[in-house]
Image (spheres, helix red, strand yellow):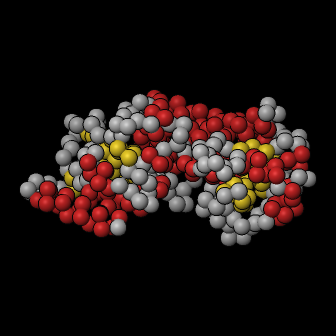
Amino acid sequence: MAKNRIKMLAALVAVGMSVAACGSTEDNGTSNNLNSENSITIEDNNGELQVPKNPKSVVALDNRSFEILNEWGVELTAAPKKLVPASVTDYKENEGIKDLGNHKEPDFEALVAAQPDLVISGQRFSSHDEEIKKLVPDAAVVELEPREGKPLDEELIRQITTLGEVFDKKDEAEKMVKDFKGAKERAKKAYDKLDGGKKVMAVNVSGGEIGYVAPHVGRVWGPVFDWLGMDPALKVDNASSNHEGDDISVEAIAKAKPDWMLVLDRDGAINADKPDYSPAADVIKRADALKGVPALKDNHVLVAPQDTYINESITTYTEILNSLADAFEGKK
């Protein structure tokens, strides 16, 4: 059904463009309606791209961008509100922002109706980039999703720095980068100075089930192992990077005897308003197999902010790293 809607919309757009097509050129999928006076040139995942200096209609699709753009006071005309964290109320509850649904069933009619001249794509919407460029050919579509094989910390810095250029918020972006680097350095120093055990286990709670989150590649916590040089309590072959983590038994997790447990509450980000929602910390405490684990006995269980699963921005990681530093320093 969504594909049919895309084809119909693309046909309508093509008709509307036919008269204006003469003499126009495209750059990185964007029609050349911009010049050096009303645009700036940036580099995104697809190369150099012209974006408007003062965009009149901004559409944001990237989960990592919502909190940042809101903090900078950027007004949106459309967004996938189901993916906007509940904490970003300026966007979540703003009836003036057209709702684009979610990445699985996007409302492309609403996207076209928003008449964007700038689209911030990424993360869950990245697979729709080519369709979006066809539907809104006069818009600059910026893609800053962390690239495969690149260190996540460097990619987060690249994203925030580029967005700072786009929205003329270079100083604010620089401050966010400085805070992120400072939090990372602080957390690493605190971990290195730990007197007790240093074995760390990361887990994900989804649907009341506890899954293993692997170092290096696991969702949210994986890269943190590398940044801080943490000692994994357990390693498995062919580990997954998806949202469910790996299907490792709770008994296997307990057998690894982690001194610290880092938790991602997936349900907290998407199902916290459901009557059967159970916080990840409660799920872990109720697991009989984990009762003798050092991390639980010593109260060394750290849960990422509730909205982390749909808010993996540089500011989220800054908060996570400072929380880790506090915990390792014995402040919580």
Q: Quadrant of residue 201?
A: bottom right
Residue 71, given in percent of the width and then of the height, sits at: 47, 31
The residue positioned 41% from the left and 52% from the top of the image is: 101
Q: Is residue 66 left or right of residue 110?
A: right
As drawn, 187 above or below 8: above
Q: Residue furthest front?
A: 275
**Relative to the observer, which residue lies in front, 318 or 298?**
298
Q: How many marks?
A: 0
Camera sees residue 43: no
The residue positioned 66% from the left and 57% from the top of the image is: 206
The residue positioned 91% from the left and 53% from the top of the image is: 292
Q: Quadrant of the N terminus?
A: bottom left
Q: Residue furthest right?
A: 292
Q: Is residue 259 left or right of residue 147?
A: right
Q: Quadrant of the C terminus?
A: top right
**Relative to the observer, which residue lies in front, 148 or 210?**
210
Q: Is residue 155 left or right of residue 128?
A: right
As drawn, 296 above or below 134: above
Q: Quadrant of residue 38?
A: top left
The residue positioned 61% from the left and 59% from the top of the image is: 243
Q: Is residue 35 left or right of residue 308?
A: left
As drawn, 49 above or below 168: below
As drawn, 52 above or below 290: above
Residue 200, given in percent of the width and then of the height, sits at: 79, 52
Camera sees residue 322: yes
Residue 85, given in percent of the width and then of the height, sits at: 52, 42
